[in-house]
Image (cartoon, coloured by chain):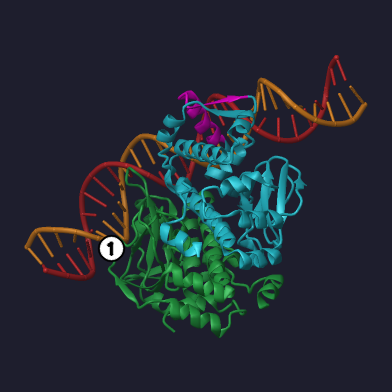
Chain colours: A green, B cyan, C orange, D red
Amino acid sequence: MKNPFLHRQLTSLTCLRSLELTLLDKLLCDEEELDKGASWIVEGDTVGKVSVISRGWAIRFKLLDDGRRQILNVLLPGDVVGFFALLFKTAEYAVEPVTPLGVHCFSPEPAFEAFRQAPRLAVALSWLAGQGERQLDEQIVRVGRRHATERMAHLFVELNHRLQRVGLMAEQTRQFPLTQAILADMLGMSQVHANRSFRQLVQDGLVARRGGRIQLLDTNALSQRAGFDASYLEQNALPTPISQALAR
Amino acid sequence: MKNPFLHRQLTSLTCLRSLELTLLDKLLCDEEELDKGASWIVEGDTVGKVSVISRGWAIRFKLLDDGRRQILNVLLPGDVVGFFALLFKTAEYAVEPVTPLGVHCFSPEPAFEAFRQAPRLAVALSWLAGQGERQLDEQIVRVGRRHATERMAHLFVELNHRLQRVGLMAEQTRQFPLTQAILADMLGMSQVHANRSFRQLVQDGLVARRGGRIQLLDTNALSQRAGFDASYLEQNALPTPISQALAR
DNA sequence: CGCTCAGTTGACGACGCTCAACGAGAGTGG
DNA sequence: CCACTCTCGTTGAGCGTCGTCAACTGAGCG
């Protein structure tokens, strides 16, 4: 099993058999290393391969002409990068590691072949893409209709959920690699205001900083402050009619 | 051809043959009608069918507990609704017509069957989903990192492009169905401020209102004011290696 | 020891929100 | 035909969140 985090993302898809999981594992090439801060994918690049993160954190973002940056999402181990970008000549976003990064790639040709053999594998990856889209939706709400401290709290709770899902919370308490400048560009506010919103949460006893890590002191209270509703992250099994259709 | 707008969305995918287009057309059931303002899809619904809009405009949005609303995107004729939602037990968003709406549906079972017969059709719909995701990315940037009047101008230019693509600009000059309250919830600002941002654009001679319609007086100047870069909307053909892989 | 990078804080102004009121137009019923 | 109502757009006043500019701290590193 080359990338256990990817497998954990898929555990709720009970229709997957070892056939599909083995095929998926065979698709993945050897792990590649990327340095923190390196330009991995640049806006305008042609993305010829799909990548799956096996270690570290990355950000996906867009830049405006005058230097403003908006981060679209944070990529964690087990997350897939560039699945749709395959279908377009150029990527309309940039991706950059915020820690040293490990990634597994796979090429489209063998993937298409695998999808023909095992359509359930194609569904599984589409389902992952759908998960990603739900997170994008929530990012729009966060940035568009929440107040600064709500945004901050909401992001923390989301990351907490996603890290737990892939079994990385222990590591997260060791390190939280997002700087306040990154949080600011993620949440659509200035770096100074990100600092103040964060300190607000600290002052209210909801989070704490120790060294380079962030601790969520009271996840319930934090969720409440954020107006957080976890349903968009829930990994229910597929709806019954779909499962049945795929079982054939 | 039941829904010509859907076909126009797919014209740039030159790899599609009449086989796929005929199959797609057969999938679509008869047109259904929806009233303006009706609750079409509600948060928490199970979405059992995919819909394609054939007439009218709709909004996809999320509500917060205290009544705040964030619109995620605007849906125009030819746009697909609920493609990914099929793979989840509940929809995490609501959809509502802002004009009288016509839709064609298709069910997942025959669609999966069609995808097996014609994998290129599955690719085409995934490509459409990818287009939608690019627009979501841009919506995040718009709301997170642009100023109020930039947001307003940017949205107008995007809608202009998308309407032209499906051949509806003539109709659009007749009617622009988004109220300022909708624009506000789309752009993450108050209704009052949406009004002021809009008036700003009017005052600068970039747009005009006549009756219920909005006219873009100077698309170039408007794009410039918006910092608009159309590349995220460009419908290039598939990258060469993908086309070749699919030609087999 | 000087460099860089991340975080912190203050001062000040502006962009955008809330509250409130009003006008125009369309639709409805008496 | 005229009130009545509802929706949508418009405008003013006042306030507060948030951005900008700037300076300073502390940690890590060569």
Range drawn in magenta: B192-210
Of residues B154 and A2, the one nearer the viewer is A2
State the predominant SS element of the stretch in magenta.
helix
Res B41 visible: no
What chain does badge 1 belong to? A
Of residues A14 and B233, the one nearer the viewer is B233
Of residues A194 and B171, the one nearer the viewer is B171
Q: Picture coordinates of residue C24 (x, y %)?
A: 67, 21
Q: How busy is the neighbourhood of tag 1: few (under 14 within 10 Å), some, or many (20 plus)?
A: some
Residue A129's place in the image compared with D14, above or below, is: below
Q: Picture coordinates of residue A34 (x, y %)?
A: 30, 69
Quadrant location, the C terminus of chain A = bottom right
**In the rendered structure, does residue B123 fall within the stretch colored magenta?**
no
**In the rendered structure, does residue B202 fall within the stretch colored magenta?**
yes
Q: Residue at x 70, y 64 (%)?
A: B110
Q: Residue at x 56, y 64 (%)?
A: A130
Of helix, strand and loop, which one carries label 1? loop
Residue bearing the label numbered 1: A38
Res A18 quadrant in image: bottom right
Res A215 visible: yes
Residue D23's place in the image compared with C4, above or below, is: above
Residue B45's place in the image compared with B75, above or below, is: below
Residue B169's place in the image compared with A215, above or below, is: above
- Residue type beneath disc 1: Ala
As drawn, is B11 to the left or to the right of A194? Answer: right
Q: Picture coordinates of residue B222 (x, y %)?
A: 45, 32
Q: Residue at x 32, y 70 (%)?
A: A212
